[in-house]
Image (spheres, rainbow, N blue to C red):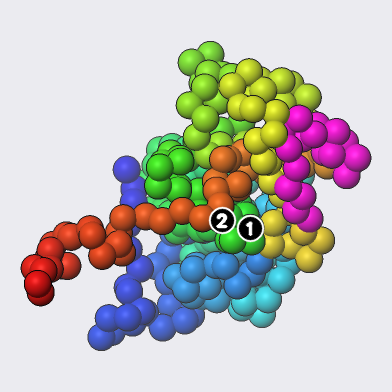
Amino acid sequence: MAIFGSVTNPYRDSPLPIGTLESGVYIVGAGPGDPELLTLKAHRILASADVILYANSLVPTQVLSWTRADAERIGTANRTLEEILPLMIERVQRGQSVVRLQSGDPSLYSAIHEQMQALSTAEIPFEVIPGISAYQAAAARLNLELTIPGLVQSIILTRISGRTQVPESEDLAALAAHKASLCLYLSARHVEGSQAKLLEHYPPDTPVAICFRIGWPDERIRVVPLAEMATVTRQEDLIRTTLYVISPALAAGERRSQLYNPSHDHLFRPRRESCE
């Protein structure tokens, strides 16, 4: 694989200055929408790159305000992979640094697998820079911990089958059987089917956070019972860029973990002997 070493860490003694990047492709997670949720590393690479290919239907233009004035900016919303890859490869072969700016985190629903395979075949070096995912930003906006001791300790990130099929073993109803904190992506167009599958295992009054365009200026969040998930989605006319968070944690009430409990000892806080 043509993966180059990490860009110099800016916190080490000899940081790589803005304006100097190795020639190659940097697949950068732009986060869910709020430009301030980019990592420092993503910001620095954006400010240094010669070329920015960005998903202009999903990435706010404000993110581009950090790019160089002379950087080439190319929107990719109306392009196929067969059009995008030659652009990246040709620019790198010229000795330029290229950012492939993706929404959210590149490890989730970002179609980078085929991009990395093609770049490796072409012997083009690349590096992946993680980003904040919508489910993390949604939990923060909801003041929500998705793993509550004694209530729920697992998070499932999934989607319902649509034009992209989900393996049968990952059918939404089968995953709902775990009654975990379930974060449902890319499913607003199929919300009735999603709700029906979720109701096979979650009680109808299970809270659902319907999160539209998290981090964008027109962000909307509604918390409703699972039984109303489809109705509210249709009333709000949500058909894309919507995340559903289905979780008992949304109604957790007062609970406490063991981590900071005086009765709980661990390596850094040994059991205290009684003074009596």
Furthest residue in direction bottom, as rendered: 13
Q: Is residue 243 left or right of residue 119?
A: right
Q: Which residue is mark 1?
A: 142
Vertical order, 85 against 25 (above or below): above
Q: Is residue 211 visible?
A: yes
- Amino acid type, callout 1: Leu
Tell me what residue is drawn at x 32 percent, y 81 percent.
Answer: 11
Furthest residue in direction top, as rendered: 168
- Amino acid type, callout 2: Leu
Tell me what residue is drawn at x 23 percent, y 60 percent.
Answer: 263
* Magenta span of residues: 220-237
Q: Measuring from the top left, give residue 274's x and y in whole percent.
A: 11, 69
Vertical order, 48 against 129 (above or below): below
Vertical order, 122 against 253 (above or below): above
Crowding at dot 1, Cα within 10 Å, few <14 / some 14-19 / many 20+, comes out as some
Q: Which residue is mark 2?
A: 144
